[in-house]
Structure formats: C-alpha cells, structure tokens
Image (cartoon, rainbow, N blue to C red):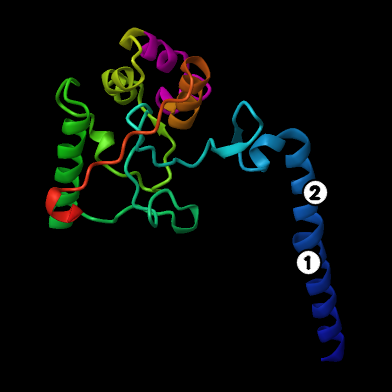
C-alpha cells in the first residue's frame, strides 16, 4: 500500500510539473517568439501609438462618420468577459422587437442607402464579439459616412475596398473587412470627424 501511494504521488508530481509548468512555459515562449502580436491580444494602435482596441473584438461606433459593426448581445455590447449570443429563437418577441428597432434606426440613419438592409447589421453573432463585416454590409453605409465627413462616396468606398481581407488560405471563410481598421483608415486619410451635436431636449423637458 505504501509503495503504491509513493508511486502515485511521484506520477502526480511529474505530471503536474510537465503539464502545469513546463508545457505552458514552452508554449508561451513559442507563441511570443513566433506570433507575439496574436499572443498579446492582436492589439491595434493609432498613429500616436495608443492602444485603441483589438482586431479580434468589435466595438460600438455611434458617430455617423464611422463604419458601424454588428449588434452584440455580449454583456452591454462586445464584452469579452460575457461572450455569447442572445440565444433567442425566431419566434421570440423580444428578438423581433429588437430587430425591428434596429431596422427603424438604420433606415433613419441611412435614408439614402438601398433596401434591403444587410441581415448582419441587425443580427448578432454567436460570440457577440464579431469585429468584422462583409464588404457588402460595409459598402451599404458609404453614403451616410460620406455625408457626415463631407467626402465623395467614391473615396469612402475606396478606403473600404482597400481593407478587404480575402478567405483564409484562399478557401476558408468569406471576404470581410475589420470595422476598427476601416475607421482608423478613414481618420488617417480624412482626419477625425467632429463629434455629433447632442440631440436638443424637448421643450417640455427643458422647463
């Protein structure tokens, strides 16, 4: 019995050292040496070197001069600590009401954009963190962005097209654009837009 216990403890100790210490340190070292950008979170920096986000996690952009991504059901929106979809089915009234509200908002914000509205602009992803859009959904927003920046739509479209990423290895996934990368490129080429003026309060509320 004592012999078996000693052997079991030795096996446990060796396994702990190999899988709990050596393996993680080796993998971390390899990742830092070969893929340091990815291993450190795929962080994105602006022209001043400040971290403004990650290539892997979407953000909320409300300024009409920026490309807007998919809605998110993760926490309060794009929360990496609460990654999930809404888990609402097609018969859910809550889902239908939320989509209807997004459709109304998008029509008001993009009055000159063609119909129908791209489905991904009113549907959440399974992770709630999707940082990318299809080129079609990005181009659908060109007119609004061009108007907000007082730039010709063709020039906005050129920036979007220049940021299109192809299929991985040429066969996996679909062409897409990273929303944050496009917005940084818009600021780099055309300058940062002014902040939109706050909506004026109703007369009854101002009293």
Q: Residue furthest bottom?
A: 1
Residue span colored magenta: 155-176
View extreme (front): residue: 207
Between 137 and 204, the one nearer to me in the picture: 204
User: How far apart are the alpha carbons under marks 2 and 1?
Assistant: 15 Å
Q: Secondary structure at mark 2?
A: helix
Using the image, determine if residue 143 lies above or below residue 5. above
- Do the CB atoms of the residues marked 2 and 1 lie less than 8 Å apart? no
Q: Is residue 207 left or right of residue 9?
A: left
Position of 85 relative to 194 (above/below): below
Of marks 2 and 1, the one in the foreground: 2
Q: Residue at x 80, y 49 (%)?
A: 26
In the picture, the quarter occupied by the C terminus is bottom left
Q: Which mark is residue 26?
A: 2
Residue 193, by quadrant, is top left
What's the residue at 44%, 37% (across, down)?
131
The picture places residue 64, in percent across and down from the top left corner, at: 32, 30
Q: What mark, if any, has residue 15 been given in the picture?
A: 1
The residue that appears at 21% across and 34% down in the rendered structure is: 106
| Image quadrant where one finds the N terminus | bottom right
- SS at circle 1: helix
Along the horizontal axis of the image, is 79 left or right of 62? Answer: right
Please give the name of the residue rendered at 80% of the width and 61% of the height, measured from the top-left corner: 21
């Amino acid at each position: 019995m004592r012999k078996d216990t000693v052997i079991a403890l030795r096996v446990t100790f060796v396994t702990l050292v190999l899988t709990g210490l050596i393996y993680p340190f080796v993998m971390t070292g390899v990742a830092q040496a070969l893929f340091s950008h990815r291993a450190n979170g795929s962080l994105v920096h602006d022209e001043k070197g400040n971290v403004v986000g990650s290539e892997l996690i979407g953000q909320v952009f409300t300024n009409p001069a920026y490309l807007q991504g998919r809605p998110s059901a993760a926490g309060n929106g794009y929360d990496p600590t609460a990654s999930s979809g809404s888990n609402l089915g097609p018969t859910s009234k809550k889902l239908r009401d939320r989509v209807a509200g997004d459709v109304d908002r998008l029509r008001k914000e993009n009055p000159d954009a063609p119909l129908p509205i791209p489905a991904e602009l009113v549907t959440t992803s399974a992770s709630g963190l999707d940082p990318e859009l299809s080129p079609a959904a990005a181009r659908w927003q060109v007119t609004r962005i061009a108007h907000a920046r007082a730039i010709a739509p063709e020039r906005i479209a050129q920036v979007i097209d220049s940021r299109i990423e192809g299929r991985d290895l040429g066969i996996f996934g679909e062409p897409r654009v990273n929303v944050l990368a496009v917005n940084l490129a818009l600021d780099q080429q055309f300058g940062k837009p002014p902040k939109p003026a706050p909506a004026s309060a109703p007369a009854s509320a101002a009293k």
